[in-house]
Image: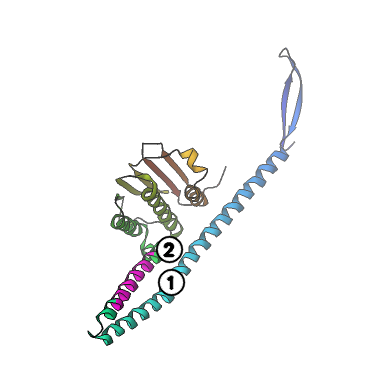
Amino acid sequence: MPGMVGRAAFDSSGKEGGAFVEDLTERKEAEHRLHKSYERLRELTSHLETAREDERKHIAREMHDELGQHLTALRLRASMLRMQLGDDRPELVEQTQGLISLVDETMQVVRGVIASLHPAVLATGIAAALEWLAAEFNRNGHTVCRLHLQDENIDVREDRTVVLFRLAQEALTNVARHAAANEVTITLERTPDACLLEVCDNGQGFDVLATRKRSFGLAGMEERVQMLGGQINIISSPGAGTTIIVRLPDRPAVPT
């Protein structure tokens, strides 16, 4: 009979006293429903991640087109006012020059926010994106970031490029905020069937189990990796630094 398994029954002395038949049909159906639910959940998570990246692109584009345009016009008008004042009103000239400097600083901040939301370099591939990320980290922080690439032309699909970049970005943010490290290393490798990313710092480390319960950053990392059927391993303990190892397969993994 399909879905039926026979088992021997034994009495208290260990002697075989009969047999019973167990129907596995219901269990198989439950496993099938669980599998389908897992697939739907992963598809929904993937959709939400794609929507989140699309929204980042949209906001970055709007900031560049609208806010950037207004700031440029403001600077132009301030510069024209500075020229019209000449040297007759030195106090107003100084204030106008201060306004021009403030606009310049604001434009730099806006460019940084736009780059953080969706770096244009992502379109050129994961290697270039990580090089940009490491350079920005070294320019703005006190911790040295070293990047090791197996190949400058590592071929990674777009969805994996975005996830790997966001993982590295989140890891570096955590290093800057919490690790008190003086060095962090990013390593990217490609195998025939997977992309491997490792971020390792020599900072103060943390209790992974205790932190995972309250850290949205770690939860976000794990969610992004699981969305693509990958694995993430976070290794850390107080005083021992932190290593994050990520493996993303070429194709989404099918749960067994």
Magenta highlight on residue 109: yes
Give the amino acid type for the residue marked by disc 2 in the picture.
Leu
Residue visible at 34% across and 49% down in the picture: 186
Q: Main secondary structure of the magenta part?
A: helix
Q: Which element type, helix, strand or loop, lies under badge 2?
A: helix
- On residue 13, which mark appears? none
Question: Residue 85: x and y, percent?
Answer: 27, 86
The mark that comes first in sequence, 1 or 2, is 1
* Kind of element beneath mark 1: helix
- In screen coordinates, is 23 left or right of 202? right
99 part of magenta stretch: yes
Asked whether, in this view, residue 34 is left or right of residue 131, the answer is right
Is the C-beta separation of discs 1 and 2 under 8 Å?
yes
Instruction: Return the residue at label 1.
Output: 63
User: Measured from the top left, where is residue 16 in percent x and y?
Assistant: 73, 17
Camera-nearest residue between 235 and 41: 235
Q: Is residue 11 left or right of residue 78?
A: right
Name the quadrant containing residue 154: bottom left
Q: Is residue 225 visible?
A: yes
Name the residue nearer the viewer: 100 or 253: 100
User: In whole angstroms, how far apart are the C-alphas of marks 1 and 2?
Assistant: 10 Å
Residue beneath the point at 34% across and 83% down: 77
Q: Is residue 252 visible?
A: no
Quarter-wise, where is residue 138 in the image?
bottom left
Residue type at tag 1: Met
Residue at image mark 2: 117
> For mark 2, does the 10 Å Cα neighbourhood hold few (<14), some (14 to 19), or many (20 or more) residues?
some
Colour mode of the rendering: rainbow
Which is more toward the observer, 8 or 241? Answer: 241
Which portion, as a residue range, is magenta? Answer: 95-112
* Outermost residue, left side: 87
